[in-house]
Amino acid sequence: MYEIIQVEGLTKIFPAEKNRLPLRAVDEINFLVKEGEVFGFLGPNGAGKTTTIRMLTGLSRPTSGQARLLNLDLTSELARIKKQIGVVPETSNLYDELTALDNLIFSMQLYGVPRSERKQRAESLLERFRLSNKCNTPFVKLSRGMKRSLTIAAALAHRPPLIFLDEPTTGLDVMSARSLRQMIASLRADGVTIFLTTHYLEEAERLCDRIAIIVNGKIVALDTVDGLKSSIQQKCIVEITLAGENGQLEKRRLDCASGIEAAIQQVLNDGSRGNIVSINTIRPSLEDVFVHLTGLNVEVMLAEKAGKGGSNAGG
Amino acid sequence: MLADDLRGMFYIALKDLKAYYFKPPNISWGILFPFAFILAFAIRNPGDLRSLVPGLLALTILFGTSSMEAIVIVFERRIGSLERLLLSPVRLPALLAGKLLGGMTFGLTVTLVILAISLAIFGTSHLNWFLLMLTLLLSATAFSAMGAFVSVAVREVFEAQTLANFIRFPMIFLGGVFVPLETMPGWLQTVARLLPLTYSVEALRVSFSGKPGTAALIDLCALLGFSIVLFSMAVHTLSKRLS
């Protein structure tokens, strides 16, 4: 198993524009992605996730630093790299006017898939993504989840060994998101290396072999999910469940480093209404790790994302 | 790499023709608009209708190639699908050349329909086929490159339409379609010489007179020059925008 992506000191600085100072969007990041793994790239809005993907896929030129993908240099061998990667951007961007089948065939034409293989390969992708019955439906008429699936199928049409998925489940309903996660897992089983950015921590926890957390352009943690959790294992976390006047339950997680009594007191001092139903000490989740490292509120982050056009696909 | 570029050019053009160009509204607009202009002129100044054919062809190829071309790239940039092409192994000049090829094919197809109708009515006497076809091809390239430049120079679709019309409409009146260049004041003739349509109309007139000479050669060279300059400007502008 070799390192399919090698990143060293990668930096992107956007020059000053009117009303904006120069922006160091990605700041000397280093990481390696092993062949066949699902590598998660997590971070809050504006942390540098998409900028990193844009640099690694040749859409944006790094200000400094180096990267090698598939043992090829990003700067001097970009055309060869492009032939061997698939990219699924945050928004489904196939051609509205073309049918599902034509969109897949056009993707194959661009990447030089032999004519004799195109139709069969497209049909097999449509079947795999459960879109066979939408074969002749224009892209514009597909549901959001179907559009997302077809966009992933198009990125796989030339059978790349490495695929970049930028927020693949953002904006999908729960069922579509679940189905897409199953597909991502099946791609991994096929040996495809996946570079995944997501806002949904449960999704990352479920799918990723290793995760890098990026904040303000810098990678602040990189490890397996268990490794990240064990880094804050010594932390004491307590989950307090409150029952409101109408019987509605509210769960609150608190750091109980100063003792469980102090955590309970904090809940009471916060003016929380209702009776305490249960108090549990729990093992830290990836969310706890994320909150610990970024100091951010995950709900606020997801709400901000939803405000930008997404919806809840977590869970 | 060259094979990737050539293949990309061909399939990008084919995709654009299928997705955007060969739609009924485009075809009818491409044919009706120049006809309406010429008809209005012919009613106002009845005379030798055959002499209007070069102008009609020039207008048809101008609108046929540049109308959609000016919108396609900015539209694809807005919806994100241009990114698909940028992520593919096709290099930027080849990508834009594919866009040009789509516009040229559509413009030439519509113009050939107009040409067939015109020749059926007025006959083919004194027609220099070689010069005619070469002029149409180079005109299509220049106007398509102009459309591509407009499309990459703006950020919104409506801006592309505005800018394209801002360039095209003065060109129609200064390019010698309705008023011969010789009858214009000297300074206006100089302005007209900066417009590709002027050379297109001139070369088409010569091809219908059947007497090609040095002037026609200069016209063809000018059209080739416009094509190269406008295409280079489009590639440079898009590359700058993307970086």
Image (tube, coloured by chain):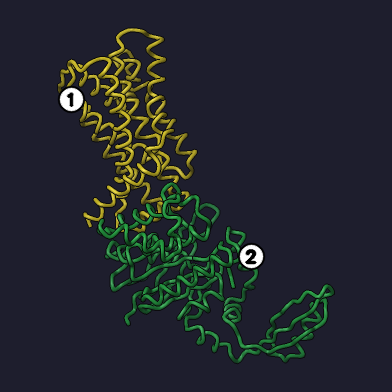
Chain colours: A green, B yellow
Q: What residue type is labelled 2?
A: Ala
Q: In which quarter of the image is the C terminus of chain A?
A: bottom right
Return the residue nearer the eye: A250 or A113.
Answer: A113
User: Looking at the image, which residue is at 36% across and 55% down?
Assistant: B86
Q: Is residue B145 above or below residue B197?
A: below
**In the shown orientation, is residue B175 left or right of residue B165?**
left
Q: Are marks 1 and 2 on the same chain?
A: no
Q: Where is residue A129 in the image (x, y as percent from the top left)?
A: 44, 64
Residue A233: image quadrant is bottom right
Identify the element where label 1 is drawn: helix
Q: Nearer the viewer, residue A171 or A123?
A: A123
Which chain's residue wears label 2?
A
Q: How crowded is mark 1: few (under 14 residues within 10 Å), some or many (20 or more)?
A: few
Q: Quadrant of the N terminus of chain A?
A: bottom left
To which residue does mark 2 refer?
A303
Q: Mark 1 lies on which chain?
A: B
